[in-house]
Image (cartoon, coloured by chain):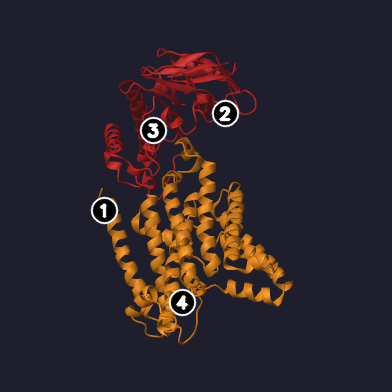
Amino acid sequence: MHQTKKHSVFIIVLLLALPFVAGVHLIVGQIDIDFSDYWNALFNFDGTNSYDIIAREIRIPRMTMAILTGASLSIAGLLMQTLFNNPLAGPYVLGINSGASLFVAFSIMTGIPFFTSTLGITANALIGAFVFGLIILFFSRFLRAQISLLLVGLMLGSFTSALVSIAQTVSQADELKVYTLWALGSLQKVEFQHLMPILGVFMVGIVLTFFVAKSLNILVIGEENAKLLGVNIKRARLFIIALTALFTGLITAFCGPIAFVGLAVPNLVRMILKTQSHVTLIISSALVGAIFILLCDICIQLIEPHFLIPINIFTSLIGAPFVVFIILKKLR
Amino acid sequence: MIRIEQLKVGYHSALLSFPSIELKQGEMYALVGRNGIGKSTFLKTITGQLAPIEGIVFMNSRNIATIPFNALPRFVSYVNARFPLVDFLSVHSFIALGRSPYTNLLGKLNSDDLDIISSVIKQLNITHLKDRFTSELSDGERQLVAIAKAVVQQTDIIVLDEPTAFLDYANKEEVLNQLTSIAKAMNKCVIVATHDIDLVVNKGIQFLLIDETLKTGNIYDTTTTKVDILATCFKSMHV
């Protein structure tokens, strides 16, 4: 079983690399903040010390969200790729983010105060992601070619952005501002007080994901064969889509739409590890995704003094060529 | 053991009917009939994937309709005509999926599971394949691997839908011999849909022949000849 040993080594290396990269992420910002400031910010917070405030309200949330974004979107992508038996599936390309955006846009435009609160936006993002997950699931029943599902996802995205544009033209200035700020997307908008609840939801998602690992392992050989091994396909599909929506909705609510991470990372991990064991794939994808977004954000911070690149643009720059590579390799 | 009672199978209306017959442990049955006559429909019905139009299927004297679908894989294993080619899925991992009806919620294999898997791999002479990826197998190797997965499932009944369809002559022989020895040595009831009549006559294999004009199926014993088969299953060809 040298294969399993190789996987363990890979995961241990990632586990050691993650805190290192996260540490680098914390110290590359323009203002020098050392680790004692971080210690104080967490355990000995002084609201009048500007270093403490930067550490607690800006740096720590940004680093945490970078990790959670990478991990969540990568797991969501992995779940979708296995469920749809399609290496090109992912929360962004299949329009799951679009669902979250649409629901958030419409609810903000109603002007009801609850819907512009953090809780309201999060709830709507989760529901929107789930509804669009169900729509994609519905269409996938009628599609044979792998590329077709992608095109449907693309159309879903276009249709949604058209609807959002219409909503924007008829909305009030205040609501438009709330939506526009939200839709820009960034790792920096999360407040410290929101980190624990976000982390809590993420952990629940991770634990539940391990419970579908067995179904995912069997789904790899196709739904028909999985059914013959006793997998309740309908329940598994719904459960997997709900988890995908949870991860994607959570991240989209706080950081806006972030492209291609969910598609690229699980493919990369599968190519490196050459396995279909989903416990290994879930852990590895989450870690690689987290490190990937941390590295992207480190680059962004390093070039920030010169010009500002949103995280979404950065992941597209790297992710889109990689997706073309996957198409060339797997779907010629 | 499978016992069927006055069975009618089909999707909306009955395609085929069967009298009350019993398929025993330790025997291999070759299911022969014309293309499109309903062999797969019959196999799907006796494996619980499709409800009968009429009649009852008993599996180890239990009415199949009363077995919950997630318990069914412990009674019967089914080998599809289509083998899934999956990148990065090793032969060992694929065969191990046959243990999934017995593993816990997380799907962890215990040492018993691993012992069963390696003994079946040895028995079928596919040790050299176990670290290969399923996407890299030849047609003959694929069938042996699919059979291995069915055997590790440790069911009394194994049903195969045309496992020899795309194989060369030597591989057809190999697969059919392996299946016969599994039925005899492991005391299993093996049912194989096949068009390779020449390879199943006089091999100690029983027959389930589908009558071309009457649209009925029945058991014929090991002494059945090719002429008998042609006269039952391919009447229109003869006259």
Quarter residue B101 falls in: top left
Q: Are marks 3 and 4 in contact (CB under 8 Å)?
A: no
Same subunit, tags 2 and 3: yes
Q: Nearer the viewer, residue B85 or B233?
A: B85
Q: Nearer the viewer, mark 1 or mark 2?
A: 1
The secondary element bearing badge 4 is classed as helix
Mark 3: few, some, or many residues within 10 Å (few <14, many ≥20)? many
Mark 2: few, some, or many residues within 10 Å (few <14, many ≥20)? few
Same subunit, tags 4 and 2: no
Q: Are marks 2 and 3 in contact (CB under 8 Å)?
A: no
Left or right: residue A270 compared with residue B21: left
Quarter residue A46 falls in: bottom left
Q: Position of residue A105 (x, y in %)?
A: 65, 67
Same subunit, tags 1 and 2: no
Spatial CA distance of label 1 from label 3 is 28 Å
Q: Nearer the viewer, mark 3 or mark 4?
A: 4
Mark 1: few, some, or many residues within 10 Å (few <14, many ≥20)? few
Tell me the number on the disc at residue B150: 3
The chain carrying label 3 is B
Q: Nearer the viewer, mark 4 or mark 2?
A: 4
Q: Nearer the viewer, mark 2 or mark 3?
A: 3
Quarter residue A123 falls in: bottom right
Tell me the number on the disc at residue A73: none
Residue B21 visible in rendering: yes
The secondary element bearing badge 1 is classed as helix
The secondary element bearing badge 2 is classed as loop
The residue to which callout 4 is attached is A57
Spatial CA distance of label 3 from label 4 is 57 Å
Spatial CA distance of label 4 from label 1 is 41 Å
The residue to which callout 1 is attached is A5
Q: Are marks 1 and 2 in contact (CB under 8 Å)?
A: no
The residue to which callout 2 is attached is B36
